[in-house]
Amino acid sequence: MVFRKLPGVSASGMGLRLSQKFVFLLFLSGLVTLCFGALFFLPDSVRLKRIFLSKTETQPVTVGSGSENDAREHLKRPKDQDHPRGMASVKGETSTKLKSLSRKPSVSHEATEERLAGGKAQEDLTLPRSKTESASEKATSADHAASSDTFSYVKFKRCLLKPPLGSDGGKPSDPQTNERREKVKEMMKFAWDNYKQYAWGKNELRPLTKNGHIGNMFGGLRGASIIDSLDTLYIMGLMDEYKDAKEWVQTNLDLNSNGEASLFEVNIRYVGGLLSAYYLTGEELFKSKVLELGEKLLPAFNTPTGIPRGVINLGSGTSWSWGWASAGSSILAEFGTLHLEFVHLTELSNNPIYTEKVMNIRKLLNKIEKPHGLYPNFLSPVSGNWVQHHVSIGGLGDSFYEYLIKSYLMSDKTDDDAKKMYYSALEAIEANLVQKSPGGLTYMAEWRGGILDHKMGHLACFSGGMIGIGADDGAAEKRQHYLDLAAEITHTCHESYTRSATKLGPEAFRFDSGAEATATRLSDRYYILRPEVIESYMYMWRLTHDPKYREWGWEAVEALEQHCRVEFGFSGIRDVYTMTVSHDNMQQSFFLSETLKYLYLLFSDDDLLPLEDWVFNTEAHPLPIIRKSCLQDEATQDKTVSE
Ligand code: DMJ
């Protein structure tokens, strides 16, 4: 090979002068440093990075909440996670913080409608949403695979006080009640059969157009109506249908979706539905599915405060806040409605991380200053401060309060913090929100920075039942008062039904400008098969056995049959005040999990899912009370026997 002589370079030993050598070496070392440094900016999926950097260097470092340090031990980055396009990586001061920001496109009108249906996000529906990539972490199932086997279904069953399905499936002795119960069962079968025929595997049935609806609330997960129906089918004894549902879960429930999901909705419907199905049937399939899904939700908690964001990509673990929620805030009813399910995820997996995540939320909420003792609906997951002073027992706030009292009950009345928080919240609600109309109806107004909005949402009607089930554990002198308050609110909600032409209640009703429990705005007149009023009838029936609650439930059955039953399923209606109804073409999955289940329970004996053993999550999925002491005794006994 011939080297052409370059000017200033001698032939011998490449012939570089000392100064030239120095410049060349400097250039070379600069180049090497640059190339190596660039490896840090490559996505994890790039092989070179995995070859050159050690395992620990590729782990994400989160912007952490108090519990995140502990959490990190259980977590690892999901494989092949690239920064989504358009997200800029920012290196923090210590090169250890990795954080990305980007804008998401506007959510569709359909998505907005879905959130309205879900109910937790009813207002300020302005679009684009801001997206912050969470450092993506996932629990290693390997870490806990062995210990998850320590949950014993047999022991759990022995710790229940009563058989879950009662002595005879809750069959009432009174023939008329039994007939009514059979009618509800027929409605469930009709709704299910049509879903199966026209929308099998999709999320909901569109009964007018006879097709399925997928939507984008569940991050690409499918079969919401199937998961939401498992326990209802089982308790109604619709065993062929239950078997079809189970088989679908076995062969078709794909949890490896890569879409954008509402953390709240996936939790209450999928996690709640699978947990209940497991506890009722003991089928390992449901347990392994729910634990797999639980892991996928964990990255949503990787925020500076540990308060999760509302939306999560189930594939990448990226999470962000709803664009319509002021200033990237998280919603009280969303992050406050995880406790029951997450505690059970810990029970089944023996992995403390789930309970740690929700206890962290609890701690923050307990500590933070509350205006007049009230909990506003919007909280920043970054600063941990309230973002707006809007308080409501309906949409955006509702199930947070529900989960406080139910956490206490589900802990076998050992969770004293939940108890204290619930009763002080209730006191603040009574002092600031509970109102009496000129016509003598008790209602819950909404509170906007001290100003009352005399409106009550259909969603807020769950509070009759909630206050009812909490009455007995309140201060002795308050118990009767709470039971009366629960009855008054349930009565008001019933009035919102009886004052409409269809005998179904509107989405929101008002108590101003002469209105008493009626909707004044056109946009509030719809009914989408919601359960809350019937839910309160069911609890009030169990607590008082006043026959009026069964009568009110039957009125609702007749109205549903007359106005919402169409040829191929059940549909919501657009205006409860007109007899020439217009259908919205949607059979919501909560109609199957909640509305029909609560009706069935209302017409059953109390020993079907007795309240001594079960609490219902906010989607009406029954979860067992955890009797720690019994479970431990059982474990000790087992040990002694085997020794
Ligand atoms: C259900 O998904 C749950 O009850 C939730 O808490 C509120 N919205 C719907 C039913 O209205």
Image: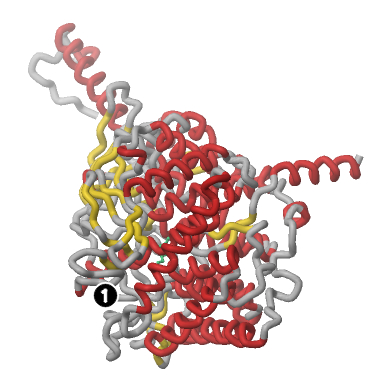
Location of residue 289 (image quadrant):
bottom right
Instruction: Please tell me which residue is depicted at 52% across the width and 85% down the height of the picture.
Output: 187
What amino acid is labelled 1 in the image?
Answer: Arg
Q: How is the image coloured?
A: secondary structure
Decide if residue 42 is in sight here.
no
Task: Say which of 257 and 637 sits in front.
Answer: 637
Q: Quadrant of the C terminus?
A: top right
Q: Which percent across, then down, holds residue 342?
A: 53, 48
Q: Residue furthest bottom?
A: 567
Location of residue 287 (image quadrant):
bottom right
Instruction: Please tell me which residue is depicted at 60% across the width and 50% down the height of the picture.
Output: 410
Q: Considering only vertical position in the picture, is 73 above or below 160?
A: above
Q: Quadrant of the N terminus?
A: top left
Instruction: Please tell me which residue is depicted at 37% across the width and 82% down the height of the picture.
Output: 503
| Ligand 1 positioned in quadrant | bottom left
Q: Is residue 203 left or right of residue 16?
A: right
Task: Say which of 160 and 199 sits in front.
Answer: 160
Q: Is residue 439 left or right of residue 183?
A: left
Q: Considering only vertical position in the picture, is 137 above or below 33?
A: below
Location of residue 132 (image quadrant):
top left
The total of numbered circles placed on residues is 1
Q: Which percent across, then down, holds residue 483?
A: 52, 57
Q: Considering only vertical position in the picture, is 327 above or below 91?
A: below
Residue under circle 1?
525
Q: Considering only vertical position in the picture, is 454 above or below 99?
A: below
Instruction: Please tell me which residue is depicted at 68% across the width and 66% down the height of the picture.
Output: 281
Q: Which percent across, then down, holds residue 86?
A: 22, 47
Q: Which percent across, then down, holds residue 184?
A: 55, 82
Say which element carries label 1: loop
Decide if residue 458 is in sight here.
yes
